[in-house]
Structures are given as C-alpha cells and as structure tokens.
Image (spheres, rainbow, N blue to C red):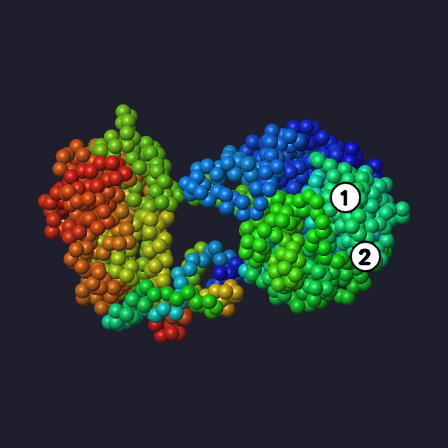
Amino acid sequence: MTAYRLTSGGLVDRGANLDFKFDGKTLTGLSGDTLASALLANDRLLVGRSFKYHRPRGIVTAGASEPNALVTIGKGASTDPNTKATVAELYAGLDARSQNRWPSLKYDFGAVNGLLSPFLGAGFYYKTFMWPAAFWEKVYEPIIRRAAGLGRVVLERDPEAYEKCWAHCDLLVVGSGPTGLMAALVAGRAGLRVILADEDFRLGGSLLAETTRIDGVSAQAFAEASLAELRSLPNVTIMPRTTVFGWYDDNVFGAVERVQKHVAMPQAKLPVERLWRIAAKRALLATGAEERPLVFGGNDKPGVMMAGAMRTYANRFGVAAGRSVAIFSNGSAGYQAAHDLAAQGVEIAAIIDSRSDVADVAPAGVRLIQSGSVIDTQGRQRVSGIVVERSGFEETIACDAIGMSGGWNPVIHLACQRGAKAVWSPELQTFLAPDVGNGLVVAGSAAGRYTLVGCLADGAQKAAAIAADLGFSAPAEAMPVVEEDIDPSFTALWYSPGAKAKAFIDFQNDVHVRDIGLALREGFGHVEHAKRYTTNGMATDQGKLSGINATGLLAAMQGISPADVGTTTFRPFYTPVTLGALAGTSRDEHAAPVRKSPLHGWAQKNGAVFVDSGLWYRPAYFARSGEKTWRESTDREVRNVRENVGLCDVSTLGKIEIFGPDAAEFLNRIYCNAFLKLPVGKARYGLMLREDGMVYDDGTTSRLSSEHFFMTTTTALAGGVMSHMEYCAQVLWPDLRVRFCSSTDQWAQMAIAGPKARLVVQALVEDDISDAAFPFLAAGIVALKGGLKARLFRISFSGELAYELAVPAGSGEAVADAIMEEGRAHGICAYGLEALNVLRMEKGHVTHAEFDGRVTPDDAGFGRMVSAQKPDFIGKRLSTRYGLTAADRMQMVGLKPVEADQHIRAGAHLLREGAKPSTLNDQGYVSSACFSPTLGHDIALAFLKSGRERYGERIVVWDKLAGADVVAEVCNPVFVDPGNAKLNV
Amino acid sequence: MASLIHCPHCGVRPKEEFSIRGDASLVRPDPEASDEAWHDYVHIRSNPRGRYREHWQHVAGCRRWLVVERDTFTHEVFSVTDGAATAREAGR
C-alpha cells in the first residue's frame, strides 16, 4: 500500500460512496472526488504508459496540466478518449480505461521500446525513416502510429447534443481562486455585470487546498461565503465546469461548459457541452500559477508527483499520496506540502532542498538535506526510494512517494494567445504576461503575486480599477485578514545535476534532458526548433509542465538568460475542446438545412425521387410502377413533354422584384444585352457578365409595369446575384433610384411544357392566352379561375410550347394539383430535374455546366446579344480585350456519336483523330451529355476550338476515366427544332 | 479580422454575419479608360500590412455594403460606414 484515503478531512462526502470501473475492475470513491483522487485512494498509482518508451506512469498533478493520467471514459459511441483523470469528476458508474498499453497496463509489450531507447533519441524518426521514400507512407508511418497511439477515437456517431451560446458582460473573471473571488466580489458589489468562470466543478481554486484561516474561518468556508454572496447578486453569473480556452479579437473569449460530462446518463433535453463566446468589456485573468516540475534522474516513476498536488489530494480530497513521502524542492512550497502531509499523519522521509542556507523550517523531526541533488529513483512500477547526492556522497532514502516543487509558472496562456510574447522576470525567475492593454488584466498568482494576501489584494484592487474605468464606483473595502501566509519564493533549478537515469522534461512525449542537448548540438537550439525536433510540448498537454523547463534548459546549456531563449508560441485552445462542442448544433440537416420547395408536397404525392441540388431538395424524377431505373422514368417524362405535356417545379429559381424609376437603367447596366426598352408585358432572356467579361449568370427578366421588373436567376446563384446587384446599386451607382428584394421563397413557380400546354393552362386561366393574345415571351398578371392572381410567363427551357406560372407559395400545391387534374385528359406527367436537363440539352440551352466562369457570351453563341450601343455595362470594357475575342477560342457545339450506341460523358476532352492525348493537343471538352430519348442516341454540348466552323467534322471524345474513346460528329448544338417552330404556335 | 463588427444600421454583430469583398479604395474606371486602368481595377490587388479599407456586406443583417477600415496586423477596427454614403461622398 502506498496511497490511501485519510480517515478524515477533505471536501468529499464520506457518506456518499460512488462505484466506478477502471480497466474493468470495480473500485469505490466518494462524492467530490476526481477520478484521479479516487484512483489514488484505491492505491492505483500506475495509470498510463508513456507515448514513446511505454514507461509506466502515474498521476503527477491535480489539474488541467496533467500529462500522464489520460484515460478513456465511456462506452460505445459516447466514448471520450484522452480525458485527464485529474479533472474528470467522479460519478457512479463511471467507466474508465487506461490507454497506450497492450495487452495490459502492467505488462505492456511496447515497453520494449524502452530497451531500444538509445536508438530512439530526438529526431530519430526523421533520420531513420528517410529511405526509401515510398516506405514512409506505406510501412514506417502506420507502424509508428500504431505503437504511439494515445486514446482511440470512436468512429460511431456521437449521440450527444451540443450547443453554442453568446454571453455579454462588463467583466469576465477567469478563475475562482482567492484573486478571482475577490475581483468578482468587488466588481459585483459595484454593479458590474460579472461572469465568473472556472474549469473546476467546485469553485474556490487554491483556497480548496489551503489550511490557513481567513477572517477567522477556514479558507474553504471563506470561499463558500464569498460564493454565496456572489450567487445572491443578480448581476453576477457563476459558471463552474467552464474552461475559458481562448482570447479573440474585440475581447471575445471562447469557453466550453461541460454541462453533463459528469453524469452517467445525460438528460436528452440538455446538451452535454456548451460552447460559449463571451463578449467581455474587460477581463481579469485570475488563473493562478502552475507548479514547475523538477528535472532529475528517474523523475517519471509512478509516485513522483507535484508537491502542490500532494497538498491538494490531502487537503481537498482527503487522500495521502504515500505513507512515506520524500520532498524535493527549491523553494518554500515544498516545506508547505511537508507540513500539511505531516499534519495528516504522513511520514516525511526527508526534504531535499537544492538551495543552501535556507530559512524555511522542516516539520519537527524531519530530516532536511540542503544543497542536495536527486540523481535517481528506485522501484519499477512505483517508487521505492530516492537516490540523493550531496557533496559527492550518494545516499538512498526509502520512500513510497516523492513530492517535487520547482517553483511557479504563472498561467498566462490567454494573455499570450494573440501574439504578445511572455516576458522573463529575473526577480521572480519566471515568465510573466506581457502588457496587452486594458481589455485583459492579469492578477494574483498569474501575475506573480503568490501570497494569499497578495492575491486577495490584487484581485480587489484591479477589479476596482476596472469598475472605475467603466464608470462604476467601487467603495473601498477592508481586505479579509489572513492568519498565516507564506511566500512561496524559490531559486530556479533547471536540472538536478548528476542524473543516473533519464531525467524527463515532457512526460507525455517522453522528452528527456539529453534530447534537448542533442537538439542544441545539431543546430535546433532555437526554442521553436527544439520543440519540433524533440517534440517537447507537442503532446495533448501542449507543454503546460514542460515548456518553461525546456526554455530554462536551453538557456542553462548555452549559459544565457531564459529571456534570450523565450517561450514557444501560446495558441488556443488552453485545453483540448471536443469537436462536438465546436460543431454545436451544426450537424446533419442542421449543418445544411433541408430546403424544400413550396411544391414539395405535390412532388411527394406524384412519386418524386428527391435529390440534393445545391441548397435545395428537388425531384430528380417521378418513378412509376414498373420503372426500374432513373433512365426509364426520365426517358418517359421527356417523351411525354415532347408529345403531350408535363409539369415541372421551378420554384427554386432565384427571384428578385425590382422597383423604381431607374429600374430599367439599372438592369441595362447589369445585363450585357439591352433592357431599357423592354416593353411592359414582355419577358427577355438576359446575360449577366462579370467585370472581366466572362458570363456570370443568365435568366429571364419580365417587365410587369414601367417601374416593376421581375428577375429570375439560376438556382445556385440566387444569393450571389442578389449580393452583386446590391453592390452595384449601393456602391457603384448609389444615385440610381432603384430598390429590390428577393422573393424566391414567396412564389411557387411551375413550368407547363409540351404541345398541349396551352390546353391545360387555358383551362385554369380566365384571361385569353392564345398565341395572338399571349405570344412567345409574353409576361403578365393573370386571374386564375377562382380569383387567385398569378404571374404567367410564356418562356420555354424545353423548346416546347411552354408557360411558367407563379402563384403565392401557400397556394402552390393546390394550383399544381389543379393543373394535374386538368392535364389528366391531355396525358400530363410530372417531370423532374433529370428530364428538365435532357430537354434543355436537346434544345441546346445552357446552364452553369456551360457557364463555368471561363465562357464569354460569344463562346456560348450569344455574341450578337451583347450590346454595342450601350455606353457601359458590367463587363463591357474587358469583354473587348484580345484574349476574349480571339478566333480560336473554344465555342459551344453539339456532339453526337458516329456509332449511335456509343456513350459520351461530361468532362471528356476532345482530340483530333490520331492525335495523342496531351495538353497541347487538347481541342476542347464536353460540358453536358445525356441520352436523348427524342433522337435515340447520346448527345452532348461541348466547347471546341473554333467550333462553329467545324460542324460535320469527326472528333475523338477522349474519356480516360471511363476508359473509352468515342468518335463523334460535331454539329449544331440545337438538336431539336432549330427553327423554333414549336415555340411559336 | 475582427470578432465583432459595429454595423452602422444593426449595431454590434458577430463577424460571421458578414461577407468580405475586398479593397474599398478601388474606383470603377470610366468605360473609355485605358486597358491598364481596367486591368488594375479588375485584377491587381495589394495585400497591405496595417490600415486597410474593405467592402464588407452585412449579408445576414441589413444587407448593406459597408466600408470597414481596419488594421490587417492588429485586427483593430477603426470605423464602419455605409458604402453608399461613402461612395456618394467620393462623388460617385
């Protein structure tokens, strides 16, 4: 037995036993325990294996910097790997497993790496696995990855819920120790909106492990009373279990709140974690200081722990880390731990102090070795002794745990996350936060004021200054009286000389002193290089314990000041944040919402098979019984539109209502073709260019009255066109009197196409829509039978006699049902995206498959549409430059296979017959292709160099992906009704 | 970049509500201007360190185009003004 539960004391509920599992074995802890304190209470010293050498490792800290005690918690899809046992709140039924060991923690096969360690020094992987290059990906990396794994990620879907929130406050206090509590009290009493956040489940920070008395009560009672007052203030929000992980622009802080990570069965109505963005006018960093480990031979054995952590386990959790504890210290903190442990009845084997002539007093009867150096530890899977060297003499002292205290590293991560570098303090022998302006102020131990009196005063004073700065008045207050206070000063010791075993700096990544020396010798002495060369500080703990020691060692080895070495870069997150919290609710349909057309219900009733199409969920085809493939359905739909009539949902087109006396002028400048003189009651096809002369979008725009136009855009560019128009109207031509708004979602729009379209539409419309009264490209408002006002456009994408009918979205389904009902006698069918696409290809109509950003109007056959008369329009000037008017540009043509049963696929390239496939020989490419039910063979739209001069020529359609070359004939891209006889009937 | 943008129409809003177009100092040349002037306007962009005026659109808010003057190095935002007002002042 080494570690054990003390018979009394601690902030644990001794009446509330909690059963939990570790590596399958059931153990018992107490309410108020962390997993780590419960494991120690059960004498579980060995909790993990190290990353590289698979050395046995035990719990080192009592907090967020823990490098060793990483476990996997949970089962199945709710598994969390790499959870720090030192911050995991114990609950009944918690199921934890150790990591990085096989077959078991005690007998780990990977430990053979330890025997090979002479060959596994820093940079080993870089040097050894260089050759042959192909081996890296296939052989070396998979083996290294398997051997060096931490916890395994679970590939099942995470069943838990997460959410994201914003919070706003005058003052954010990070940390609830003496500094944070005083700051929150002062600011809260002054009336500031205060948020007090702490990563722990119990607030109070270091006060929870203090033995001194404040204002006549225990430190714990003082913390509780302070929190009770804060809870009573309506302007103060207390956020336990909340890690403030990042500081961002405009004083916005990122924080993650673990709402239900500490319960066995999370409630469905609550998230397990919340990601907060806290917009704080001011913030006060009261994050305390991290105790610095000492670098000595054998310092990684289970049983070696931070002296402060031993205090915390004893005072807060009522757990002794050992029965006979040796303390190795370079300052007062080690003595404080010795006193507290001795008071709990723990034997102190010895205090080894690296300093000489110190004023600190050891507990009565405890042996004190000054000017001592620890050179090794004894024991295999747990410590059994400590080897001390003094004045050249070696001595072994039996003990079952070692507490080390190497001074303090203020926790300044947040202050350094936005580029400002930490500043070395020669007096304090540590790095302090830089001055980062008044948005973020560092106080208490985090600012190097380590005494309890100093923390309380600093928190109060800085909070009062912030309150005054924000216009609040904070009354001067009497400071709490601290009975006994110690100044935990120290003399930096970067390396305990004479190590007879590996002296580790980074426990998690297995970096030891010799690795740092090697990095320096091989030219990687810069602190950022040394980090990457040795991997020091690159593990999941991000060097919380190892970073400053590496800096100190690099300085000591070169005989320079740590100020000249500096620190590595501090980056968010302070501790790892789950991907679930970062994603929040943005998963599945919440990440990409299912956007349904107003005719969705109609489509469903008619047997639609839906497909994700951009932002929308659209009918691809309407399967009828007996149809086995999408092609069968599509071919039927196409034939029916060509022979009878079909109804297609085109509600997803972007729709923009444009108003104003200058609306026509505005359109004239937006489109490359003329719009100024478009008559009322007419629709016109329009082409929008980018300023570089390429086609941006196309669509039809109708003039409903002299100052009201209705524009449609392609579905995918509805948002883009809107923004483009807003830019033009607001920034380029702010004096044009034009206003517009999107009405995409307000209209249900349907295309009724086919030779019998008029019969169907006329049956529903009161107005006369004969060819004479409502000719091709007519547009206007009509009355439907029953009185509903609708917009009717005689436009055609299919090449057939066709109408587009727009009705208010809420009436869409009823109108579509009525059309189907009227159309039944004429053989109407619903048709989907696939048929729509085939119909337009047969007619040679373009989509964004053709307008891919490299195509000019002339390339697509619209050269004559571009106005030469207009003084200006978007894209005018650059569309005349040489490259865009060259004769050998690729022009849109049609292709049909010479042998009718052969297939052409979009994306294929075009070559002259006999030419080798090469970039130089590239003649063009296929933009769209399909089987044409009307013609009985494949057809394609393609871009071919000087294509319009080459109708009749044979060309090779080279399709490397499909592995087939097809010979095709170049032809006019309008395959069906090139004379437009079907439109004008 | 900034975390919060003070939209002159909507107040302080998170940056995710905005989309950024780029350099706000560009002035669309006259249609008769030289090839070089048009080439500069359409294709050439500087990438300055320090003060920079950009067009941002409040796409998830008022949908106005704004001129955001900010420091590309410190991320400090100096001013946010309405793009149309700025364009009018510039005599466009």
The residue where tag 1 is placed is A387
Relative depth, front residue between A222 and A577: A577
Residue drawn 25% across and 34% down? Answer: A634
The number of numbered badges drawn on the structure is 2
x and y percentages locating residue A644 in the rendered image: 18, 36
Residue drawn 66% across and 44% down? Answer: A502
B4 sits left or right of A684 in the view: right
B78 sits left or right of A866 in the view: right
The residue where tag 2 is placed is A356
Give the quarter of the figure containing the C terminus of chain A: top left
- A28 to A219, vertically: above or below: above
The part of the image, by quadrant, that contains residue A952 is top left
Amino acid type, label 2: Ser
Q: Chain of mark 2?
A: A
Residue drawn 56% across and 60% down? Answer: A418
Mark 1 surroundings within 10 Å by alpha-carbon count, few (fewer than 14), some (14 through 19), many (20 or more)? some
